[in-house]
Image (cartoon, helix red, strand yellow):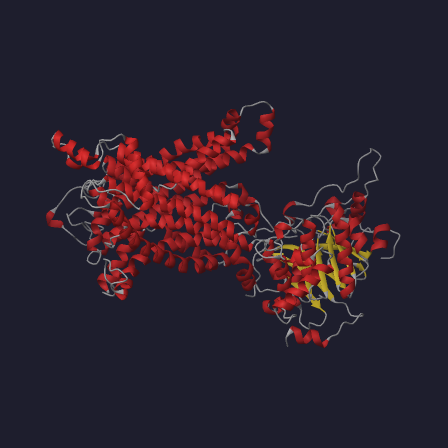
Amino acid sequence: MLVQLTKRTLLLLASLVLASVLVFWFLSVLPGDPAQVALGTGATPEAVAEMQERFGTDRPLTVQYLDWVSGLPVGDFGVSYVTGATIGPLIVDRLMVSLWLVGAGMLVALVIAVPLGTLSAVHHRRPLGTVLAGVSQVGIAIPNFLAGILLIGLVAVSWRLLPAGGWVPPAQDPVEFLRRLLLPALALGIIEGAVLARYVRSTVLNVLREDFLRTARAKGLTPARALVRHGLRNAAVPVVTILGLQLAVLLVGAVVVERVFVIPGLGSLLLDGVANRDLLLVQGVVMVLVLAVLLLNYLVDVLYTALDPRLRAAA
Amino acid sequence: MSADALAAAHPKDPTVSVLEVRDLTVVTGGHTLLEDVTFSLGPGERVGLIGESGSGKSLTALAVMGLLPEGLTATGTVQLRGVETDLLRIGERERSGLRGRRLGMVFQEPMTALNPLMRVGNQVAEVLRIHGTVDDREDATQRAQRLLADVELPDPGRIARRYPHQLSGGQRQRVMLAMALANGPDVLICDEPTTALDVTVQAQMLQLIAAGVADRTSGLLFISHDLPVVATVCERLLVMYGGRIVEAGPTEELLTRPRHPYTEGLLAASDLEAVDDQGRLPTIPGAVPPDGRFPSGCVFRNRCPRGDEACTVWPGWSGSDGDGVACWYPSEGRHG
Amino acid sequence: MSTPQPLSGPSGQVPIPGEDVSSGATMSRRSLPASLLVGAGLVVVIAVVALVSFLWTPHDPLLVQGAQRLQGPSGEFWFGTDRFGRDVFSRLMYGARTTLLVGVVAVGIAGLIGTPLGVLMGSSPRVIGEAVMRFNDLLLAFPALLLAVMFGAVYGSSTLTAMVAIGIATIPVFARVARSGTLQVLSSDYALAARSAGRTKLAIAVRHVLPNISGLVIVQASVSFAIAVLAEAALSFLGFGTQPPTPSWGRMLQEAQELVAVRPSQAVAPGLAIALAVLGFNLLGDGLRDRLDPRLDDRRGTG
């Protein structure tokens, strides 16, 4: 167990280092000198040189990389070449907003996916099962920003039930916070729910075919109780795996939904950074997103081992 | 009236059979998989159901248990002692109340039949708790350990805390047996319980099954394709082919003086000493038709050495339920 | 709960016609699965619309007509006009072209690089294969959308950067599928027989592996196409994909966003087009999988 955990942790660290090299190379080396980028082609050599000195971009690339990467563990992402703002706190602020959105979206997705997927598995090859499978298939095909736009048009503009967008921190006004969180969370969660429902369906279908479920019924459990007592825990193992990976997908999907609902999250920060050619900021946000994806993969691995005694023993 | 009340009204009576299956027919989409299967099981009686793969043995067991896959429908009657209503006609809830309490079953594949995420002790305790045969959790745990000891698992307290993957195939099958016998069922069905086990542990398992049903005077329906195995356990045999019972009789009689050509073929094929004049082991010519497409009339006629025009019509059963044959040209030597 | 749940038998004894647990398997023998038919139908419709748009559209999709702004659907403008007076239907037809182009190029890049890479890694020594796959998994941590935004930041936004970025982001998916397929084929009896006959792993890969994993790769291509369509739409919606005035469905949706309450058809039309395209390729992939995956023919029953 401990050996396995150590191995996985080392692998995570190696992946993070490699990812940081890739991100740095892509966003700091490829585009050319950031001072030149920030000042534009018309800048005088003196101005460029002065800026290079100010931001330290005149140093060798390895030194610049080590300088950047050594700050990451303590949340120091450097200072923006464009706005002069400290990037770290900015990212943390925006990340909190995105996490609220992703968390709420995942909650919506689970509330939809678990019953929908289980029902359509139990009613496999019967009309209800086919209809539910079709519903989730259609749901998957709808982009979350379309869902967002339609929700705004209907709920916010036509019915005037909820605000069309914007953000209020929970500490400031909890009610308004929820009112503004609801629509984007639905836009993100309904579509994700359709995606998850397919996984839940196929997992439950597999579990329904398991011999031990027949044993459970031979013991005297009704089909429904056999599924709940013996099936769902077994189905949970693969679903948790997917859940972790989908959280990462949702975090990136939130980039678009944030744009639709004008939410100042990590996605908006990323898009603003690109619009302003603020590459160090983009570099920081990309690194945080990749870190989140890798970390989630790692946690899924660990959790998977914890949930399944067979793996626990093997580990 | 609930099944419980009915069961209470009928104490164990050695003269009444515990299970009566009559004209059991299973169809799916116009395709007949089992036809007119009729047999009975006395208390403490051990009956073997033999035949090749695809003959319908497991389907018979599942139909009796009420565990047929979706899309398959059973007709006929399945009568359990003390339950007035035909088992094929009662609701799922009542059936669940009988399974695990009055009907126990051990499946073929011990590697997959247990829940991999649950300690085996809890899996045994669960069957006690479902039917309310124990007072509380503590009692269930104690009883489960005693049941594990009954099937001769060493150190049952320790085994109870294990997960299935930590046990050998033989140990798992013992756990399955402990679960099936937990509530002292009237009927125990074992579907190829030793097929997946090593030869060395097969004999022990067979002894445990025999002892388990003897202790509880349960009727045993033992399903296998392996004649020597069935012969050691069962007093009476049913030979199945193409979804029909083609011959029935006491083990000794049936093995020494078979009447149905299929039974003869099975016997010859299981006799490893016998060789024909060209030095080959005897086999039944042909194979079980794929997709269960057996011929009309006598289901065995396309593989039968004696098949002729008469066999295009099903011969019908001659003899009693417990001792008879369905063949136009049965071998002589035994009264029909 | 009066009907029993589907439960598999202990061994494949009497196969039960029409009762195999995997969907579509019985159907696949006699007729085509419904998902395949519907999926292929949708894909063909979109392809035909894209092709027709080269020859004919009801109006010039780029023609700005100030006098015709925000018309509702009519005989002349079937889906109405946008806020520049351009015909929405013509723009949708043109957008099908963009969508298919991005999908074909992105999936082409991913498949043509990822598949050989996966086969190579599958037939390389285990240590090398594992190491490259670890790197492959790392690349999976860069979703298409994120990679495309990065590309946009460095190289500027265009249809080209979008499709290249989506393609690159999809390479690891193909590599993974191809490698696991390769490992499976190489451990099969006939591959072992070929090896014992003295053939090199690479020769076997070309002779036995490629034909055998082609089904897997085709299914993956269809599914990846759907993902690419969604990614392109999202990128164009964000302004990172296809640049105006070239019509693209994601961009049209973005332009219609503010008008959704006034002219919902403006948002619904491109939205529906995206959804139908994604649905089509997803169903096509599902249907192909049902038909090509031999494991689904492993019918189980009880005897």
Name which quarter of the figure residue C244 lies in: top left
In this rendering, the answer to whether A193 lies above or below B80 is: above
Q: Position of residue B157 (x, y in %)?
A: 67, 59
- Would residue C196 be found to the left or right of residue B330 on screen? left
- In the foreground, A186 or A43: A43
Q: Which residue is pictured at 51% across the width and 24% down the height? A: C203
Res C160 quadrant in image? top left
The residue lying furthest to the top in this view is C198
Residue depicted at x 22% and y 65%: A160
In the rendered image, the quadrant that contains the N terminus of chain B is bottom right
Q: Nearer the viewer, residue B37 or B177?
A: B177
Q: In front: A181, or B154?
A: B154
Residue at 43 percent across and 31 percent down: it is C117
On the rendered structure, is C123 left or right of B141? left
Q: Is residue C190 left or right of residue C62?
A: right
Q: Position of residue A44 (x, y in %)?
A: 11, 31
Where residue B32 appears, x then y in whole percent? 64, 55
Report if residue B170 is visible in the image: yes
Residue B215 % position (x, y): 78, 64
Q: Is residue B54 visible?
A: no
In which quadrant of the rendered image does the C terminus of chain B lie?
Answer: bottom right
**Front one among A174 and A141:** A174
